[in-house]
Structures are given as C-alpha cells and as structure tokens.
Image (tube, rainbow, N blue to C red):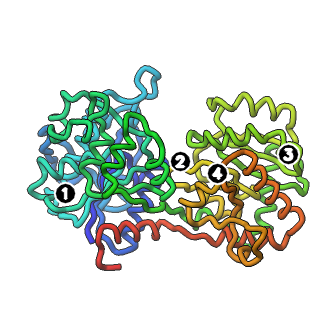
Amino acid sequence: MKILVICSENYSESASPLARAIGSIVSAYRRWGAKVLGFSPYFSQFPYNSDSKIGRNFIEKLGNREYSTLRSAACEDDLFIQYDNYFGRSGIYGNGNPSERTYHDNHLRFSFLASAALNCSIEMDFKPDAIHVHEWSGIAGALTKTIYKAFFNGIPVVLTTHNMGYDYHCSPDDIPLIGLPPEGFDIDGYEFWGKVSMLKAAILYSDKVVFTSASYHSYLLSTDLQGGMRGFLESQRGKLSSIQSGIDYASWSLPKPTEEVKKQKKDSLRAELGLAADSSMLIYSHLDSNSGNTAQVISTILANLLNMNLQLAIGISENNKNFPYFAAIQEKHPDKIALLPLIENDESLYHRLSAADAFLSTDSSEPSLSLFLKASATGTLPISNMRSQKSFLYLIPYDPSSDEECIKTNSFVAVESSPDMILEQVNVAENIFREKKSLWSKLINNASSIRVSWDDTAKNYLLLLGSESL
C-alpha cells in the first residue's frame, strides 16, 4: 500500500508530542510494509539531519510559488518543503509574543504546505492509495478535490485530529488563496461566526476523520462545543471514527522484577521531593490543560487524602489557576503532598509514573488517553471514573464482590466522577495496597500486561484505508 503523509511539524526530527505521534505511525506503517512518502516544512531555525536537496525546484499550483525539497538523512522518503517566506521564522505556529500567539497567515502557510506536498507527489510520480493528513495539513483534502483533482481523484483522504482545541480562523476574502470551494462557506460547511474555520474545512473535505481514542470521540459528540461545532460533527458522523494511539513499550515498560524496580524508583522520587520513604501509597496526578475535572475532584477531597496513609505528587504548572491553592496546602503538609513542574517530556513523565503506585485522573477529554496507557505500562494502577472506563476499554475495574474479576482487574473505577465516589475508590486502592500485597502484585501485573503499540495503531489505520495485505 502507498500512503502520502503530510504533517505541519517535522515528524522525523522534532520531539513535540504531535511530531512524535505522527513519526511513530509512519514508522509503524513502514514496518507493516507500506510505502510512505512524507512531507513536512523545513523550519530553518531548527537543526536537521538533512541537507540532501532534490535536484530541482518545484512550483506548486495554488499560488504558483517556487519551493525546494530536501530529503531527510534518516529516510529518503521523508521530505522537507523549504520555503523561507513561510517557514524561516522563529516559531512553528507563532512567535510566542502575547500580541501574536499565532502567525496571522498560518492559513496561507499550511495551505501552501499541503499544495507543495501534493504537487511534489505528482512531480515524483507517487500516486498513493491513500493520503493521511494531520491538524493543519488537513486542508489537503479540499485541494485534492479542486486544483489537484485530476491526479488525486478518488484517492481517500484521512484526517487525524489530535486535538480539536486547535483551530484557526481567517477572513472569507482568503478563500481563493487557500483553495477552498467557495460554495462550502455556510453554517453547514466551513463557516464559523462569519469567518473560515480551517478545522471545519479539514473535516468537511476529508473522506474519513479519526480521533485518537474512543473516549475523545465520545466526549466530542456529547459535549457542547463552541460555535455549534458539536452540531457540525453530528452532520459529519458518518465519516467519524476513532483509533487508539499507541505508545512505545520499549520506552515505557519497566524491567523485571517490576515491583522491585518500582520500589527503587519510588524511593528515588521521594528523596527528590523530600517525602518520607515509608510504607504509604504514592499517587500521581498530571494536571495539564485537559485536567480540569481532576483538579476539581482532588481539591474537594484533599482534606480526606491528607488524613489517609498515602502521599500525593502532582504535576502542575505555576500558570494553572489551581496552583496557588495546592502550593498553600503543600506548604502546610510537605510530608504528604509534593508539586512537580509540568514538564512535557517522556523521560520526566516516565520517572514520575514508574515511581507511583496509582495514577489519579477523572478526565476523558485528554485526546489520546495516552497517560492511562503509560501509567499501566509502568505498573501504576489508574484510579478513574466510569466515563473513562466506558470509552477506554482497556480499564477493567476492581469489583470487591467478584473474586473472579480480580483475574483481569487493572484499575479502580468509580461509577461517576463525583468526589465522594472517587474518594471511595482511593480508599479501596489504599486498603488493598496496605493489607493485600499479593492481590496488589496481581493488579500491577494485569496493568503492565495492557498492550496498545504503535504497530497496533498503524494496523488499524491500514485496515481503515482498505489495505488488502494484512
């Protein structure tokens, strides 16, 4: 199978979460035997392992702009679109200044990227069986149905939306400049409060739209979204689906013996945080931008948690509105609660999750629910709510009334995300941790046995794309 991939970030070079996810899918595609030709921008401010320029320059058809293409040193089929007017700036999406958090012409920059990638595919005589686009590059779906229709007619475009929170709006005056069919500019199309929604346009003109977990899919279709976006998604329901994003188990699994390794890591983290190395359970919570409900639940039951035989480590940014409250509690109870900077890198997160006994989260709006997978891989038991469990089918809740359930149990799940019910699950978990060591060991083994790899993710994409080789 031949797949054309277009990404707004350098998936073969960058360490951002989006780039890592797309790079992992592309690598897995290739392990499954697919031929992948991938395009991303050449951001000149970043160092690259590539300087191999394809022999000549190209001219894309959207704005008749000339650009060059570079090959990655890692893989000759990973290509960079070089156009300094758009990609020679200080940032990927914006310059970081409060006055301009995103560049005013991002719609032009990334429609150009899509056009250049499609044009280059034609010039290289690479006719794919499917086109896989992500976030900003989703405008490619429209271009395959307009100016590039002659070559790509009938080839399905699959859009993965990694986070629906990212959208960009532009003036309808720019519709011709970004290659959108003008008849689509209405409330049922890509219009958004009188402007063009690049996200709606990407969804509208893609043949299939994939969310990164069943939970996120369910959340978006059951939540009131800004500007009538939920109604728009409902109108596109027939093309919507979900494929669970995987993780790299070579990076996340603990070496054997698991419990002995966890104890060493737990002692190390406690020493780092100034927490006593006693026999109590250590719970970790990761309060990022998707964790509003978790923060509220913890705030409500924190007095109860402080009176239990456990310690609480919280990853939280100083910019989080809840930070002052938790910081004040930490100052009074430094032996019970520790705050860690919210550093978004795998090494730091692995250090925290592998040291913890349990991972507390009640938010199913985190797009890929990767934290549940990563916690489980490190033998850290999730404490969550039924909403996550229903949509994240890998969680099998502990049921004290059924000894048979313990054979597969790997989590503690409340029927609802109410603070009282979550507190009850914390109590159950802490009791088992303290009084039933052999059962806790079994639960750790069950959790670390969950496997959703990037190969699994790519296989499901290939099946969605109609691959006959699997």
Q: Which residue is at a point 34% across and 67% down the rendered structure image?
A: 464
Cα separation between marks 1 and 4: 38 Å
Type of residue at label 4? Leu
Describe the element under mark 3 as helix, strand or loop: loop
Q: Can the viewer see residue 194? A: yes
33 w.r.t. 119: above or below: below
Name the residue carrying label 1. 121
Q: Nearer the viewer, residue 283 or 64?
A: 283
Q: N-terminal of the two: label 3 or label 4?
A: 3
363 w.r.t. 131: above or below: above
Cα separation between marks 4 and 2: 19 Å
Q: Residue furthest left?
A: 150
- Quadrant hosting residue 131: bottom left
Q: N-terminal of the two: label 4 or label 2?
A: 4
Name the residue carrying label 3. 275
Name the residue carrying label 4. 349
Q: Which residue is at a point 12% across and 54% down the rendered structure image?
A: 149
